Image (cartoon, rainbow, N blue to C red):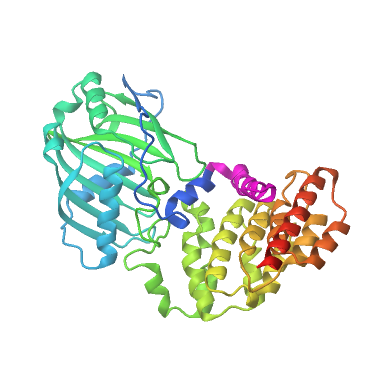
Amino acid sequence: MNVLQHEATLAHMHILRPIITYRICYLLAGTILTHSNVMAQPGSVLRIEVREGDPNPQAKRSESPTRAILERLHSLALRSAQSQWERDHVTGGEKSMRQTLAVTPDALIGMVTISDPTGDVFAAKWTPSAAATGLGIDGMAIWDVPEYNYIILTCAERVFDSASTVETFLRRILEWKRVLPVLQSVKVWHGQLPYGMVLVGSGFLAPGFEFGGRFEIGAWLRGHEVDLVLKIDKACFGGLYPEGSSYVPERFPPLKDRISAWPRDRILQEIGKTWQAAGPMQAYPNRDKILMREALRRGLTSRELETILVAASPRQDFLGLRVDAVMKMVVELNQVPRYHEAIASAISARDRIDPYTIRSLFVMLAGVQQDDFSNEALECVAHCTFPDAPGFPMGAFYYLGERATAETARKLSETVVPERLQKMKGATLLRIGLRLKEEKQK
């Protein structure tokens, strides 16, 4: 790896660092990563702590909406999957259970979908495996919404007789198999809690995420059985679900099918609506990605794309994630030359777009051979020097190292850069010289 490639690697790392609290989780949500067989590191130990009593007995506990979900789940009329889209959700739900639990579901009893303005629901039930039944589990189900998975185990009441039996049970059933985030510990309180609860607690996921990193656990008494519920953010199950399921409210039928009949203006008006969401959905551009793909397919003006790339967002990092998603589609559809002006305007909009996103843009554009952004990169090398993001012009240097001609290299050598970037400039000129020599010898 040469010096510039090393710096480019560092650039990718720094893109994530300032917003690590949720951008990694965005990757895990399946917007970028698509792997489904991610396993935990060997030898990792999950710490489990069970205490007797209420964690906050002085506060008036509010009724949990989870109990309403349980009441609805147990009254559902189930059916078989009727499309590949529904079968994909059966698979995703089952895999999320297998990557959270040591016990596994056996045969699918049935599933159902429910339309909901706040987010369509997928629900399914399985018979438990023999091993699960032996531990006191009588049923396994999932209540799957765009932002969370509720993994539900119907258990024998005896499992919750004491803190000791609860701890033993949790140690036997919990087995986190995801690489990131890692479930490091689970802490619960056991006892006679308000609203029929017999258990309440949470899990600690690392790294911690500002959006999309919740792991909650609760149990509700129902007759002579107890429903144990694990509420886990959808981002923790990246790659297990098809695109358009996680953090997209319209799922049954999927949004991509619905919008085929929408007029063009409505599609543009819908972009950005999830920024107003109250939950973690506000941080994920998954819905916008689907809308943008359809908008690009129908055709956008350069001005329209520029408006999308530099929109007024609640936070700069939210906009950065959207820019990442939109630009990947522009590149994928080979439309970079068509929108050169809009992309160049976004790069120069340094008062409206965060510097880490500008760097990401250059790294992405370096692989697009059909267009040239050397002039924009030279301008950034000279002027993209924000004091709160030292060194972020690495994206522009990387672009020039990969794409600059001999004439562009001459201009770079004459460009004045801050002292802290002199080594970067020298490494870039060296990289350009070596690359041009290699190209000439071919």
Q: Look at the picture and state if 185 lies above or below 394.
A: above
Magenta segment's dominant SS is helix
Q: Can residue 109 be seen in this view?
A: yes
Quadrant in the picture for residue 376: bottom right
In the rendered view, does 22 fall on the left or right side of 199? Answer: right
Residue 311 spot, x, y in % from top left: 64, 63
Position in image of residue 300 (x %, y %): 59, 78
Residue 116: percent from the left, percent from the top?
34, 60
Tell me if I can see residue 352 in this picture.
Answer: no
Q: Give me the residue at 57% from left, 69% from top.
A: 331
Confirm whether the magenta stretch covers residue 2. Answer: yes
Count of numbered circles on the image? 0
Q: 227 or 86, which is in the foreground?
A: 86
Which sits in the foreground, 397 or 236? 397
Q: Image quadrant for the C terminus? A: bottom right
Question: Does 80 sit left or right of 33 as displayed?
Answer: left
Q: At 47% across and 62% down in the image, what residue appears?
A: 287
- Report which quarter residue 159 is drawn in: top left
| Residue 126: image location, x then y, percent | 17, 49
Q: Which segment is the magenta one? A: 1-21
- The question of residue 298 being in magenta is answered with no
Q: Determine whether, in the image, residue 138 is placed left or right of residue 265.
A: left
Image: 60 above or below 404? above
Q: Which residue is drawn at 58% across and 54% down?
A: 318
